């Protein structure tokens, strides 16, 4: 059966740490980093990469479009 | 499959549109303006009307929209964006002209221009971002501020007796004969973002029909002005703004719903 796997790349310098992407992730794959970027914001990162299915919800609500989404179909 | 195997250009399904410049958005973290900017530019990109689109930036938080949107833009005096858009669309009838305005611009100082442009039925798109407050100048009371809402010029909450009721601009212009499509959307969750994008796309497609103004209101948060964090402000918006400003289409194809 084909399964969808996804991954996101967060532009850490663009991310302003608003945390809007955290609740919209149905798979709970995102968390806020303990580190800060150059502006002093905690940025989002993929804490559970295996859970991501590339649904683009996080990228859609990101006001700064800091998230790029990748998705691939894997057949097992 | 490893993460690095997934992150390849051929697997990319979503990225920032090229019609937004690399300039960092000047908005506060979590502000709906950023999403509204990006949605507008994504729609322009998808419709393939980049060279034929002219935007009019307002005065307010989004005054720098011309720095962020990588298309032909101009900027109007406070509230006069619909008047300027009227001139542009009459001089270039084949161009897609849109204004991008906040509530202090469109519903306060620009009420006359907005209502008359809508009444004349100009062939433009108006994108109206309503956050119930003057965000840029320090959180003063706007015409759309809710009753009882505390702002820096109504520190005990807005009183209806002395300050009047919040102005429902979208319902107001929906009753004018010149508007063709009037809708109210929001951009705080992924579902609402998808709906708002469809609404903006429909508004831009309506320009080809030359039937009148397409008016898209986007109810947004202003976490700095409301003195909340982004997630709290979105929840506050759902609980307090949406009962007064219900989401959905108000006028479709020139007919009130």
Image (cartoon, coloured by chain):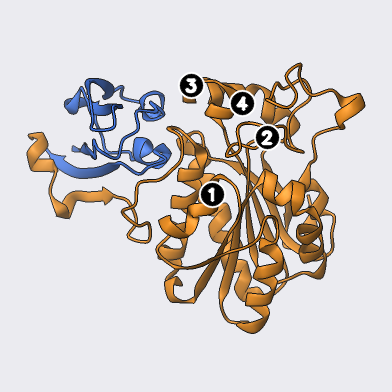
Q: Which mark is residue B238?
A: 4
Q: Residues within 10 Å of mark 4 (few under 14, many from 20)?
A: some
| Residue at 61% across, 38% down | B137
Q: Can residue B254 be spotted in the picture?
A: no
**Residue indicated by mark 1:** B62
In the rendered image, residues at marks 4 and 2 fall on the same chain = yes
Instruction: Say which label, 3 or 2, has the lower sequence index.
Output: 2
The chain under label 2 reads: B
The chain under label 4 reads: B
x and y, in percent, of residue B52 in the image? 49, 76
Q: Quadrant of residue B190?
A: top left
For chain B, the rendered hue is: orange
Q: Which mark is residue B229?
A: 3
Are the residues at dot 4 and dot 2 in contact (C-beta closer than 8 Å)? no
Q: Mark 2 falls on what kind of element?
A: loop
Tell which tag, 1 or 3, sits nearer the viewer: 1
For chain A, the rendered hue is: blue
Instruction: Say which label, 1 or 3, has the lower sequence index.
Output: 1
């Amino acid at each position: 059966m084909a399964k969808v796997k996804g991954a996101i790349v967060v532009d850490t310098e663009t991310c302003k740490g608003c945390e809007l992407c955290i609740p919209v992730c149905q798979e709970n794959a995102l968390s806020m980093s303990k580190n800060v970027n150059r502006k002093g914001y905690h940025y989002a990162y993929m804490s559970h990469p295996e859970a991501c299915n590339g649904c683009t919800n996080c990228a859609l609500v990101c006001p700064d479009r800091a998230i790029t989404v990748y998705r691939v179909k894997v057949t097992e | 499959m490893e993460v690095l195997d997934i992150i390849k250009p051929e697997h990319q399904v979503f990225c920032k549109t090229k019609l937004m410049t690399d300039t960092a958005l000047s908005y506060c973290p979590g502000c709906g303006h950023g999403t509204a900017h990006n949605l507008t530019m994504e729609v322009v990109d998808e419709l393939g009307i980049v060279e034929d689109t002219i935007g009019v930036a307002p005065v307010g938080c989004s005054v720098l929209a011309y720095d962020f949107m990588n298309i032909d833009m101009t900027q109007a005096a406070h509230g006069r964006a619909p008047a300027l858009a009227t001139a542009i669309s009459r001089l270039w009838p084949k161009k897609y002209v849109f204004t991008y305005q906040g509530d202090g611009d469109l519903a306060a100082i620009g009420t006359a221009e907005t209502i008359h442009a809508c009444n004349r039925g100009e062939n433009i798109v108006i994108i109206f971002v309503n956050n119930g407050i003057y965000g840029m100048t320090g959180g003063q009371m706007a015409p759309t501020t809710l009753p009882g809402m505390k702002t820096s010029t109504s520190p005990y909450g807005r009183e209806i007796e002395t300050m009047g009721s919040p102005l429902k601009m979208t319902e107001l212009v929906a009753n004018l004969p010149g508007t063709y499509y009037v809708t109210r959307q929001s951009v705080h969750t992924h579902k609402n973002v998808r709906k708002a994008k469809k609404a903006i796309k429909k508004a831009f497609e309506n320009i080809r029909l030359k039937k009148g103004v397409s008016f898209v209101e986007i109810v947004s948060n202003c976490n700095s002005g409301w003195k909340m964090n982004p997630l709290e402000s979105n929840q506050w918006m759902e609980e307090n703004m949406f009962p007064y400003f219900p989401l959905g289409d108000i006028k479709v194809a020139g007919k009130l719903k």
